[in-house]
Image (spheres, helix red, strand yellow):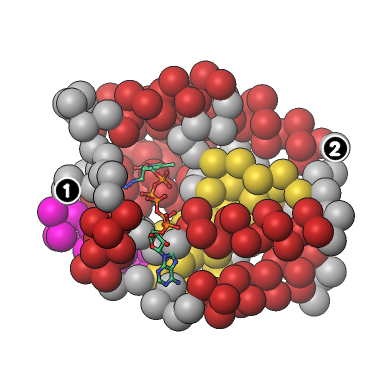
Amino acid sequence: MFITLEGSEGAGKSTLINLLKKYFSDKKFNFLFTREPGGTKEGQAIRSILLDKTIELDSYSETFLLLADRYEHIDKVIKPALKRNQNILSDRYIDSTFAYQGAGRGIDQKELQYLMDLLNYPKPDLTIYLDLPIEEGLNRVKKRGKSDRFEKEDLIFFERIRNFYLDLVKKNPERFLLIDASKSTDEVFNLAKDSITNKLYGK
Ligand code: Z5A
């Protein structure tokens, strides 16, 4: 089973993943938690460039770095795990590129699809999207303290991304579960845990 988690800034992906990790490890479930960018040693080096506020990247350079990260991730982590029949949860995956580089940066979606197809990527069975009004998410991130190269973008950039995700969820109801991330961490966790469990047991 291949599950992905998406969301905009401060929606609570890391918080949710920590709760899911504990829950599935207590249940002795064979679950691999991974992320993009940075799911491999090579990807971690790429991630540090992508998040560095002192580095200026053209949107295409940013995209190619993300795709290099993804190629390494698919080749070294995702495909081998799926071959072993291991369950995987990836914090961000292909939808992030269509949302951030497509809707956010303005790269044509067809160009992105062409580049993505070159990766021959496994498709997720379930994608959980944590939805939160942008200002609320940015306030949470501000309180947390540190920010990265993406988080210095303006509200409109993040609104375009959120609207893109909302549209994607509407068009792909069989793959997506939208969770209202303004709910408490416990409520968000229970909704995500139940939907993953149902998917694992084919309900
Ligand atoms: N990116 C891209 O552009 N294209 C791509 O293809 C890919 C990625 C794959 C890094 O991703 C950047 O890469 C990202 C998109 C770009 N851009 N940004 N920014 P990332 O996933 O590593 O980073 P992130 O999206 O910024 O996630 P984050 O900063 O780690 O936030 P989060 O995981 O969603 O939130 P959190 O750390 O769990 O929570 C934030 C705060 O809110 C924290 O203080 C929590 O205690 C609090 N919180 C969490 N849940 C709640 C609830 N339910 N109520 C109240 N407070 C809460």
Q: Please say whether residue 168 is one of the residues in the magenta stretch.
A: yes
- Residue, x 48% and y 65% (percent of image)? 129
Q: In whole angstroms, how far apart are the C-alphas of marks 1 and 2?
A: 40 Å
Q: Is residue 97 visible?
A: yes
Closer mark to the observer between disc 1 and disc 2: 1
- The residue type indicated by label 2 comes to Arg
Asked if the beta carbon under badge 1 is closer than 8 A to the nearest atom of ligand 1, the reply is no
Q: Would residue 56 appear left or right of 21 to someone viewing this image?
A: left
User: Residue 27's spot in the image, x, y percent?
Assistant: 84, 61
Q: In this picture, is 170 found above or below 46?
A: below
Q: Which residue is mark 1?
A: 153
Frontmost residue, 35 versus 185 = 185
| Whether the residue under disc 2 has CB within 8 Å of ligand 1 | no
Left/right of residue 87 with respect to residue 171 in the rendered view: right
Residue at x 83%, y 55% (from the top left corner): 29
Picture residue at 66% right of the left edge, 25% below the top: 76
Query: 103 above or below 180?
Result: above
Q: Is residue 150 above or below residue 139?
A: above
Circle 2 residue: 84
Element assignment for label 2:
loop
Query: What's the magenta region?
Result: 154-171
Q: In the drawing, does residue 11 fall left or right of residue 188? A: left
